[in-house]
Amino acid sequence: MQDVRTTGIPVMDPSAVEPRRPGSPLWRATVALTKAELRNFFRNKMQLTFVLLFPILLLVVFASLFSGSVKVGDETVPLKQLMMAGIIAAGVMSTGFQGVAIDIVLERDKGMIRRLATAPMPRAAYFIAKIVRVLVTTFVEVAILLSISVFAYHLPLPGTGARWLTFGWVILLGTFACTLMGMAWAGVIPSGPAATPMTTPIFLVLQFISGVFITLSDTPKWMLFVGELFPLKWMAQGLRSVFLPDVMKYGEPRHSWELATGAIVMGAWVVFGTFVTWRTFKWRGPKVI
């Protein structure tokens, strides 16, 4: 409302002014985009199948097929128990690296990222929303894999608080590392049709050279070196330290869980992935005007 004082100048009535919505623009944009990300993810049957359900299928198939055991010292561990820790790590990489890289490239080709870039919102909200979505879906993925492992295949839960703490930081740091790795890789992929062929083979190869399905002691040294450059190997090894008897560390290549080294490598991927994403991220696809 306006009134006219003796000067004749219109004055805005303060009670008629719409109050500002609480929170910063970054916060409001992040919340809105995160809701959209989660809604779209769980409605997309392809994403649910290849990102969320594929590791679950791997767990069921491999745990059902392999019935042998591995012996280190006086300790014997079922082979399926050894593999489950690695498959949980693969589930984290599936939601982080594979899901994010393919998702970003497809959105870029459709012009969705371009529209967001021209909208009156902080661009950082787009990346934060992606990370939050990955954190939520990773929690769901890990909860399902852990439940199947415990109730169907009798995987023992961590018995100490220290092991639960290791479980938490390995999953959290691994999620950030794989997500930033996926964002960085999206900048390399030229178009939507190339997204899956350029992403899925990398994910599959890393599973075989990172100790997800086979023991690393049987891996050629050059493959072991390549695997050690990426987060999946360190996530799988860190989770084995959580779920397996401590003597099983002597079955690792350096006879140690190397948790500190794993934290350094995964942390380095967070930094490196952030830098590469900042330098190479494309807001417009090749066919977007």
Image: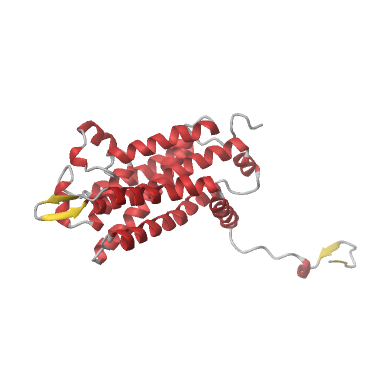
Indicate the position of residue 82 as horizontal and vertical percent values: 24, 51
Left or right of 235 on screen, residue 182: right
In depth, the one of 160 and 32 nearer the eye is: 160
Residue 183 in sight from this viewpoint: yes
Quarter of the image for the C terminus: give it.
top right
Indicate the position of residue 31 as horizontal and vertical percent values: 57, 57
As drawn, 71 above or below 200:
below
Left or right of 115 on screen, residue 164: left
Dividing the picture into quadrants, the one containing residue 12 is bottom right
Indicate the position of residue 5 as horizontal and vertical percent values: 88, 67
Indicate the position of residue 225 as horizontal and vertical percent values: 24, 35
Residue 263 in sight from this viewpoint: no
Q: Which colour scheme is used?
A: secondary structure
Residue sitting at 21 percent across and 48 percent down?
258
Quarter of the image for the N terminus: give it.
bottom right
In depth, the one of 84 and 94 nearer the eye is: 84
